[in-house]
Each structure stands twice: as C-alpha cells, then as structure tokens.
Image (spheres, grey):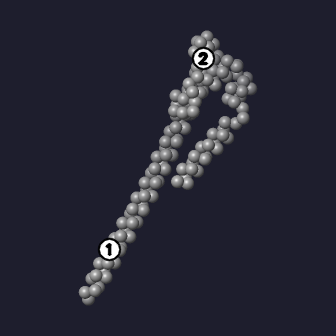
C-alpha cells in the first residue's frame, strides 16, 4: 500500500515540477515562434493530450482559424501529434505501474499462502510423529 502512495506522490511532484511557471505558449513566443503558431500549439497540445487519454484536458480547436491561418494550423497539428504521443506514453506507464503493483500484491499473497500451507503441513507431521511415538 505504501508503494502505491509513494508512486502517486512521485507522479504529482513530477507534474508540478515539469509544469514550471511559464506556460508553453509563453515559452514558444519567447523562443521566437509567431503568436499564431503558439496559439495553435497550445490548443493542439490540449487536444492531443485529451486524445491520448488525459482526463483533465479538453479538446480545443478554433476550426475557422485552423482553415484560414496556416501558422495556427501548423502549430495545432505539430502539438497534437506530440502531446498525443506523450499522453499515450504516460497512460501506458501508469498502466504498467498498476499491473506491476497488482503482480507484487498477488505474489505476496501467494507467498503468504505457501508459507501458511507449509506451516500447517509441519504441524500435521508433528501430530503424526507424536501419535506414532505414543505407540512405542
């Protein structure tokens, strides 16, 4: 149980750490990308994360602008693919971690059952030995 809480805390802390103070849009603009591209990238990333399985994002796309502004459309498309892949990878990692946790819990239970069975077998053997010794 402690491991699952520890894992959850690592995920939360990582999310907070990697989100930083500057938004993705601000970062792109600071790097010299056009505002339209940064707007499209921001919207496309939210959409890609949603498509990739992130429950906390919303699909965002200014359809009119997508068809009329090539920079917005390029930013949206670039980000959608990138963020969808990242969200799918994060979802996959989470599923693997959950499956590993289930496996470890099942293994622990099986080991406990085996130990219990062995202890019961030893007790039966002791009783049998005592019973047999009583007839000497």
Distance between the alpha carbons at the discs numbered 2 and 1? 75 Å
Q: Is residue 123 visible?
A: yes
Q: Residue at x 48, y 49 (%)?
A: 100
**Label number found at residue 124:** 1
Dot 2 and dot 1 residues touching (CB under 8 Å): no
**Quarter that holds the C terminus:** bottom left
Q: Nearer the viewer, residue 41 or 124?
A: 124
Residue under label 2, please give it: 62
Question: Position of 30 compared to 131: left or right?
Answer: right
Element on which disc 2 rests: loop
Q: Residue at x 50, y 39 (%)?
A: 92
Q: Percent from the top left, x then y, of residue 69?
A: 63, 13
Callout 1: few (<14), some (14-19), or many (20+) C-alpha neighbours within 10 Å? few
Above or below, comparing residue 1 to residue 56 in the picture: below
Q: Percent from the top left, x then y, of residue 2?
A: 55, 54
Q: Is residue 80 visible?
A: no
Which quadrant of the figure has residue 15? Answer: top right
Point out the tag, 2 or 1, that comes first from the N-terminus: 2
Q: Residue at x 57, y 50 (%)?
A: 5
Q: Percent from the top left, x then y, of residue 65?
A: 61, 14
Which quadrant of the figure has residue 115? Answer: bottom left
Question: Position of 57 compared to 118: left or right?
Answer: right
Q: Residue at x 70, y 22 (%)?
A: 33
Element on which disc 1 rests: helix
């Amino acid at each position: 149980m402690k491991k699952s809480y520890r894992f959850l805390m690592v995920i939360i802390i990582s999310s907070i750490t990697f989100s930083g103070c500057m938004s993705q849009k601000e970062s792109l603009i600071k790097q010299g990308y056009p505002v339209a591209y940064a707007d499209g990238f921001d919207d496309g990333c939210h959409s890609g994360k949603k498509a990739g399985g992130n429950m906390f994002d919303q699909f965002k796309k200014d359809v009119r602008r997508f068809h009329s502004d090539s920079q917005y459309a390029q930013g949206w498309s670039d980000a959608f693919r990138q963020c969808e892949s990242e969200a799918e990878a994060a979802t996959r990692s989470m599923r693997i971690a959950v499956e590993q946790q289930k496996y470890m819990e099942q293994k622990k239970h099986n080991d406990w059952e085996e130990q219990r069975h062995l202890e019961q077998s030893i007790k039966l053997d002791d009783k049998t030995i005592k019973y047999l010794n009583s007839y000497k």
